[in-house]
Amino acid sequence: MSAVRPPEGARGRRAVWLAWMVQVLLIAAVVGGVLWLVNHALEVLRARGVRSGFDFLLQPAGFEISEGWLDFSSGQPFWRAFLAGLVNTIRAAIPAAAMAVVLGTFLGIGRLAPHVLVRGLCGFYVQVVRNVPLLVQLLMLYFALTQLLPDSTEPIELVDGFWLSKGGLSMPWPVADEGSFWPSHFEWPERGSFNVSGGAALSPEYLAVVIALALYTAAFVAEIVRAGITSVSEGQKLAAQALGLAPVQQLRIVVLPQALRVIVPALTNQLLSLTKNSSLAVAVGYPELVSVANTSLNSTGRAFECIAVIMAVYLALSLLISAAMNRYNARVALRGWH
């Protein structure tokens, strides 16, 4: 007499439950191992007479942060300084990522253009930019912004309301009336006798970091987009032509939606790299997370703790980006036949 098999639904639920339990136990083991390593390292440091521990995060920082969205003063604790550095990292990474995706998409399409000149220029850009170290490009951009541009007394007006000089870029910015949360009007920068006042000012350090990250990452995104487009079968493109779609419509309606299935997974890696590459901003003095950690390390001598904070923050950022991109990838991934 054969044993009674549980219904398919019950077996499926049991398999899902077991999978979740395995993942929870694995995460708990990893977290426990990391906590043990951190605690062991702190004990070794104390045994050698080295001050250790994360209690310094509650002490006054004693230094200023030159720019950023989060207000910070020297009397505030170290944890708020790290938070201000994290906000500055995000402040640079998000616009750089958006610019890199847009520019890389156009370059990738240009690499497949029928015009020889367009195809050659896009290929030249990709080959040059991705084969020059990012740090070198960042330093060259910073030199160009701080040495080759005119002084703040003689700024260049790029378009109406946008002024560029050695002091950075001044542009209109929405402001709210006193007592109101939502912006009600734009404050426009005005040129004065010595500099430009009003509006929002972006420092040359910030501009160098954002532009360098965007231009460098765009070269890699271009190759990803090119590979994604070439992965779409010629039959799909011929079918789009048979329907009478214009070349731009073929690309937008037929080719790119299918190419996303190849583009998104590889693009995730580039966005992760861009976020971590923002740590090179310390070379030009932009106060992002690593720069704040270096200053904190020099002030307190807590090298292990400051490095641990950097590692934890970048790990959290990478996991968040991966989760968001994986969720988007699930929406554009190829569905199986039912």
Image (cartoon, grey):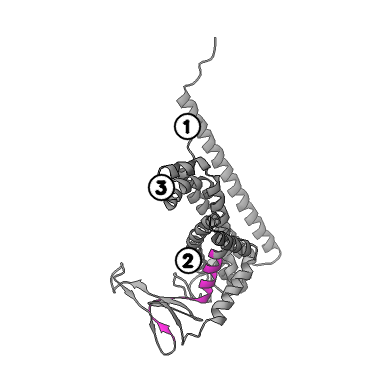
Residue at 56% of width from left, 56% of height from top? 111
Name which residue lies at 50% across and 30% down: 14
Callout 2: SS: helix
- Graded by Cα atoms within 10 Å as few (under 14), some (14 to 19) or many (20 or more), the crowding at tag 3 reads some
* Residue 337 numbered tag: 1
Query: What is the x, y in percent for residue 86?
Result: 51, 64
**Nearer mark to the viewer, of 3 and 1:** 3
Write down the residue under mark 3: 245
Q: Nearer the viewer, mark 1 or mark 2?
A: 1
Q: Residue 67 location, x and y as percent?
A: 48, 74
Of the residues shown, which amino acid type is indicated by label 1? Answer: Trp
**How many residues crowd mark 2 within 10 Å: few (<14), some (14–19), many (20+)?**
some
Q: Secondary structure at mark 3?
A: loop
Q: Is residue 66 above or below residue 181?
A: below
Q: Which residues are magenta?
A: 195-214
Contact between marks 3 and 1 (CB within 8 A): the answer is no
Mark 3–mark 2 distance (CA, rounded to whole Å): 40 Å
Q: Nearer the viewer, mark 3 or mark 2?
A: 3
Q: Is residue 209 rendered magenta in the image?
A: yes
Q: Which mark is residue 151?
A: none
> Disc 1, disc 2: CB below 8 Å?
no
Amino acid marked by disc 3 = Leu
**Are dots 3 and 2 in contact, CB under 8 Å?**
no
- The residue that label 2 is drawn on is 91
